Image (cartoon, grey):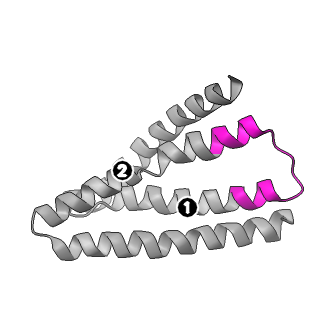
Amino acid sequence: MFKLVMIGAGGAVGAVLRYGVTGVGQRIVGASFPLGTMIANLTGCLLIGLLAAVFAGPYLVREEYRAGLMIGVLGAFTTFSTFGWETFALANDGQRWAAALNVVATNIFGLLAVWVGYRVGQNCFGA
C-alpha cells in the first residue's frame, strides 16, 4: 500500500513539474513547436538514466521510494502521451517536417540523455 501512495504522490509532483517546465518551454518558442514537452522528455530521460545507475550502485534505496521517483515523478513528468498528441497535431495541421523533427530529436536525444545520465551516475556513484 505504501508503494502505491509513493507512486501517487510522486505522480502529483511530476505532473506539477511537467506543467511548469512545459509552460516555460512554450513561452520560449510560442505555440509553433512543442519545445516544452521535448525539454520535459529529455530531462526525464536524463534523470531516469541517472537514477537507474544510482539505484544499481552502492546506495540502498527502498523499493517504495524508487517506485515513487521513477514511476511516479518521472512517469508523470516525461509526458510521452502529450508528445504523441502534439506530434499528431503537428502532422494533422500539415506541419509534417515539424512532426518528424519532434519524433527524431526527442528519441535520439532522449536515448543519448539516458546514456549520459547512466554514465554520470556510474562515475559519481560507482554503479
Residue 113 falls inside the magenta stretch: no
Q: Which residues are magenta?
A: 51-69
Disc 2 target residue: 81
* Crowding near the residue tagged with mark 2, few <14, some 14–19, many ≥20 C-alpha atoms within 10 Å: few
Kindly state the secondary structure of the residue where label 1 is placed. helix
* Crowding near the residue tagged with mark 1, few <14, some 14–19, many ≥20 C-alpha atoms within 10 Å: many
Residue 32 lies, in percent from the top left, at 20, 63
Residue appearing at x 84%, y 62% in the figure: 125
Kindly state the secondary structure of the residue where label 2 is placed. helix
Residue, far left: 94
| Quarter of the N terminus within the rendering | top right
**Left or right: 122, with 48 as reference point:** right
- What kind of secondary structure does the magenta stretch mostly adopt? helix
**Residue type at numbered disc 1:** Cys
Q: Quadrant of residue 9?
A: top right
Disc 1 target residue: 45
Residue 54 falls inside the magenta stretch: yes
In the rendered view, tell whether residue 86 sits above or below residue 96: above
| Quarter of the C terminus within the rendering | bottom right
Among numbered discs 1 and 2, the one appearing first in the sequence: 1
**Residue type at numbered disc 2:** Ser
- Which of pointers 1 and 2 indicates the residue nearer the eye? 2
Residue, far top: 1
Residue appearing at x 49%, y 63% in the figure: 42
Residue 35 lies, in percent from the top left, at 34, 62
Residue 19 lies, in percent from the top left, at 40, 42
Residue 114 lies, in percent from the top left, at 60, 67
